[in-house]
């Protein structure tokens, strides 16, 4: 790999810019540790010029949210015929839209919490109070509210009291034009990383997430010490196999490529519920993918070097 060089794209203009920069720095350092020449580039107005004038052998997209996950950057890279690690544009669009991903998996028999999607315009045109009342009648309480697009749990919150719904909805709509409201499933929250290998997608050890506050929100994700993690997750063998199978199924059904992370919850009866999938998972010092890689006895640098190789050979 020493005769190749990689551009790591990080930053961008989404709400997740700071997290993306931290992910970019970490994956860049990991690649350098295994002998890959790396430059870190921001996804700004100079990017196209840079890609044309100083064409890398491959790109690692470490952008979170917005153009980094909705297929936009991937489309540009395809137009320029530059290899990149990650999912192609069409599959990006399917996975980026949480309701679309849930619906596709539900149609295939995957268990996922019941949900509704409500755009901002619905509340404005029909009135918030009757819409929220209907939502609670349909789904019950507690509810998990989150923006229909986006990551890092920005705007996501659990609502246990109907009186708190209006404020929670406003918080979600600060990050997207629509809210995904789903039944809250209590249980063991896990994240499962899937890596494409020579024999197909492979699930790494599940990471169990135990936030101090009880909710794995933005603060709990990116503030060291506010969440306990157990890798592998403290699940019985049947549940361990089930969460791995779910993650690989989601990866395949949604057409994801190279790397993904599936979030799920295992309820008291041992049933596994799909929550969402992340096609550009975080790689910061508190992120889940590096924990899973370490638990598998592998290194972040070696895995990404292999994925770069795979991208170039496609």
Image (cartoon, helix red, strand yellow):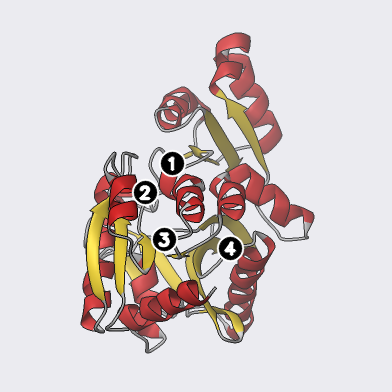
Q: Do the residues labelled 1 and 2 touch (CB within 8 Å)?
A: yes
Residue projecting furthest to the bottom = 297
Q: Which residue is drawn at 77% across and 59% down?
A: 108
Disc 2 to disc 4, how far (Cα)? 25 Å
Vertical comparison of 182 with 28: above or below: above
Report the Cα–Cα distance between label 1 and label 2.
7 Å
Q: What element carries label 1?
A: loop
User: Tag 2 or tag 1, which sits nearer the N-term?
Assistant: 1
Q: What element carries label 2?
A: loop
Comes first in the chain, label 4 or label 1: 1
| Camera-nearest label, 2 or 4 | 4
Check contact, mark 3 vs mark 4: CB within 8 A. Answer: no
The residue where tag 4 is placed is: 256
Q: Where is residue 4 in the image (x, y as percent from the top left)?
A: 31, 77
Q: Where is residue 88 in the image (x, y as percent from the top left)?
A: 56, 57
Identify the mark nearer the N-term, 2 or 4: 2
Residue, disc 3: 281
* Residue 251, position as x, y percentages in the image: 61, 66
| Residue hosting label 2 | 217
- Helix, strand or loop at disc 4? loop
Among the two numbered marks 2 and 3 on one chain, the one whose residue lies closer to the N terminus: 2
Tell me the crowding category of disc 4: few under 14, some 14 to 19, or many 20 or more residues within 10 angstroms, Cα based.
many
Taking the view exactly as shown, the residue that stands out farthest to the front is 53
**Mark 1, residue position:** 156
Who comes first in sequence, dot 3 or dot 1?
A: 1
Image quarter where the N terminus lies is bottom left
Relative to 132, residue 239 above or below: below
């Amino acid at each position: 790999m020493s005769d190749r060089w990689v551009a790591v794209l990080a930053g961008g203009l989404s709400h997740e810019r700071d997290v993306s920069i931290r992910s970019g720095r970490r994956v860049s350092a990991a690649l350098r540790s295994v002998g890959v020449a790396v430059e870190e580039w921001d996804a700004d107005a100079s990017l196209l010029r840079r890609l044309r004038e100083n064409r890398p052998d491959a790109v690692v997209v470490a952008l979170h949210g917005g153009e980094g996950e909705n297929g936009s950057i991937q489309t540009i890279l395809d137009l320029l015929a530059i290899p990149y690690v990650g999912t192609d544009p069409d599959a990006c669009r399917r996975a980026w839209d949480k309701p679309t991903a849930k619906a596709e998996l539900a149609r295939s028999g995957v268990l996922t919490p019941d949900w509704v999607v409500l755009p901002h315009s619905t509340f404005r045109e029909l009135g918030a109070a009757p819409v929220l009342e209907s939502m609670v009648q349909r789904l019950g309480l507690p509810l998990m509210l989150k923006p229909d697009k986006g990551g890092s749990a920005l705007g996501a919150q659990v609502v246990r009291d109907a009186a708190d719904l209006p404020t929670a909805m406003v918080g979600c709509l600060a990050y997207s034009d629509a809210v995904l409201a789903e039944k809250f499933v209590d249980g063991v929250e896990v994240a499962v990383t899937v890596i494409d290998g020579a024999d197909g997608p492979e699930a790494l050890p599940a990471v169990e997430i135990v936030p101090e506050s009880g909710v794995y929100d933005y603060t709990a994700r990116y503030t060291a010490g506010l969440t306990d993690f157990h890798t592998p997750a403290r699940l019985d063998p049947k549940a361990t196999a089930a969460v791995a199978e779910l993650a690989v199924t989601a990866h395949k059904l949604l057409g994801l490529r190279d790397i993904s992370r599936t979030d799920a919850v295992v309820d008291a009866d041992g049933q596994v519920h799909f929550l969402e999938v992340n096609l550009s998972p975080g790689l910061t010092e508190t992120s889940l993918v590096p924990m899973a890689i370490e638990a598998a006895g592998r290194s972040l640098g070696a895995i990404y070097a292999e994925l770069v190789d795979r991208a170039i050979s496609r």
